[in-house]
Amino acid sequence: MNNALNVRLRLGLLVLSGMGSAALGFILLTPDQALDAIRYGGYWVMALTTALFFVAIWRFLRLERETLDWRRLDWIALIMAGAATYLLLIHEPHGFKVLNDELVLAATSMSMHLDRQVFTPLHAHNFDGAYIIMGGIVDKRPFFFAFFVSLVHDLFGYRPGNVFFVNGALTFMLLVLTGLFARRLAGIWAGRFSILALAGLPLLAINATGGGFEIMNLCLILVCLMASASYLERGSRESLNLLVLAGILLAQTRYESVLFVIAIGALVLLGWIKRRDLEITPTLIAAPLLLVPYPLLNAVFQAHKGFWQLPDNVESPFHWSFLGNNLSHAVAFFFDFSALQSNSFFLSLLGGASLVALLVVFPLRFRKMGSLTPAFQALLAFGAVILANFGLLMFYHWGEVDQFVVSRLALPLCLLFVFASVFLLRDFKATPTVWKAACGLAGIFLLGVSVPVTAKEFSTQRFPTYRETAWFREFVLEHRDEGAFFVAPSPLVSIVYRQPCLANSLLAERAEGMKYHLDRGTYSTVYVFQRFKDDWTDNRDTLMDESVLGPAFVLETVGERQFAPNFRSRISRVASIDPSLIPEPDDESIPWRMIRDTIRLEDEDTPEGAAARVFIENLP
């Protein structure tokens, strides 16, 4: 009787938690309030969730340790994972590749490290020896990865390159988890094969050496798969808590990963049905509230419609008319044999055929979920979401997978290809000889095809924005000790390296303030980054809109590069500013209170204080 009352109480609390989180996330807060809640409260919610996650990992591993036999550990697979990680990290250049996504994450992690705010700085000055953030935005991207990188900054000091160490470590973890889950599906040789098959994907190397959240996303998918299989097999509270918390963090790593919450809910429900017991832990009750940051981020899209990045001729981000074109580009990516794409045709052929076979055979072979192993039940639920996400991508206006920026979205499907191949080989009763042959083929493809493709860096170097950003980054690092001010259409490179900066469009509005500080020698010089579109028909170039400064600025070219046939980039120095061509200043001035409250200044009523105020109010 008491147990029934306890279950009803917990179920009621879970329902109340869900209703409360829905009201808080979608109804009670205005868009401005939601942005403030994310900015000032998001860090602490993520800190709590992450702390609970690591506690859940500890308790889960402590439970697993009781049944762990060290003699059964596959040291060969661990060595394979280490060697494969080395190959994935050694050939591709380390750098920010998917722009501006990776730079936004880096800037947000800096803000979370320094100010404990979910905020992306876009405007900064040096004042009285301090680096002061003057403005920015709450970005649209889920922020768990940025939070995790900020923890690394806390432990080892702020360095933009910390993110590359994070992704390197996560890559090893990804391969280990892949091998462990494949072993649960089909045995020890399946684990070894899966490591080699996934490591043979050049796309993985690109993301392993970048600054994005893709590797973290895959790792959390695998943690959820492992926890799901354990929960369905044992029904332990430890595995349930780990599954729930990993799912919450997964939902706040990539936009579309929130759909995995559906798979997790289905697996928890399946566990209840199997045991005829509603196992509702305090973690499960708190889960809806810990997910509130995700719906609050929807306010960012309401506040900044441009975040959808819709071309002028596109009215809706999703439409059926994009399907045919996107499918053709997907085929071109997965089955490219020219080494110009970052695909693995070995994995595409084997995994694609296996996935199709499973989709055809599954309804005939398995009429009840109960006849499947727990690992396959978990794979089925998560695989359905992976396919749904990829299907949704095919209806997206920017869903051409053979484009460098979009190709990373194929990573979860490639992971599914690996496990589909494993399960099909298992279902065909593959002998150890067959598994060894499969490992041999995967190893030959890794060393004979993937390593040369990765070493050529075709996909990365053919992306002009990556090379352009790397060039500007080197320029900023070369001149950062000069006391210079940097201006660019997107000032994120300067922000990440803690240099004073501003966007071109804002400097055009603050020309008078810039002249004031150039005349006073506040900054030794002002460097301006601009893009030009080349028109070969009449042999002239056009300054792109985001690079326009206005007629008051007289520039001297410092450097120029052609990164693509149709556009080139230029770095210039501001030689002078013509006061007669300066437009009327905007009524909105740089907030005096922002700096006054950050740095202790003299009283405003004194001559020194008044001079400081004039100095600050003229900051561009």
Image (spheres, rainbow, N blue to C red):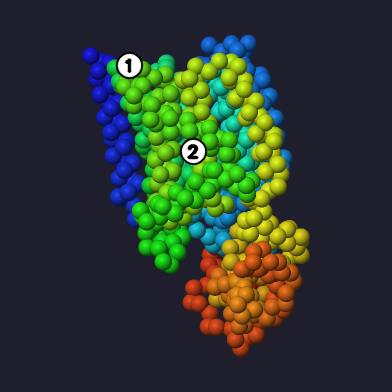
Which of disc 2 and disc 1 is earlier in sequence? 1
Amino acid type for the residue under numbered disc 1: Arg
In the image, residue 384 sits, relative to residue 491, either above or below, namely above
Q: Identify the residue under disc 2.
A: 413
The answer, for residue 576, to whether it is visible in the render is yes
Badge 1 crowding class, 10 Å Cα cut-off, few under 14, some 14 to 19, many 20 or more, is few
Disc assigned to residue 251: none
The C terminus appears in which quarter of the rendering?
Answer: bottom right
How far across and how far down the image is residue 366, in percent?
35, 22
In the displayed image of the protein, which residue is found farthest to the left?
1
Residue placed most toward the observer, 134 or 338: 338
Tag nearer the camera, 1 or 2: 2
Q: Residue at x 57, y 39 (%)?
A: 345
Residue placed most toward the observer, 213 or 518: 213
For this view, does 520 lie left or right of residue 590? Answer: right
Q: Residue at x 63, y 18 (%)?
A: 74
3D distance between C-alphas at marks 1 and 2 = 32 Å
Badge 2 crowding class, 10 Å Cα cut-off, few under 14, some 14 to 19, many 20 or more, is some
Amino acid type for the residue under numbered disc 2: Leu
How far across and how far down the image is residue 425, in percent?
51, 22
For this view, does 409 lie left or right of residue 86? Answer: left
For this view, does 375 lie left or right of residue 211? Answer: left
Q: Identify the residue under disc 1.
A: 275
Quadrant of the rendered image containing residue 381: top left
In the displayed image of the protein, which residue is found farthest to the front?
337
Quadrant of the rendered image containing residue 580: bottom right
**How many dots with numbers?**
2
How far across and how far down the image is residue 255, in percent?
45, 46
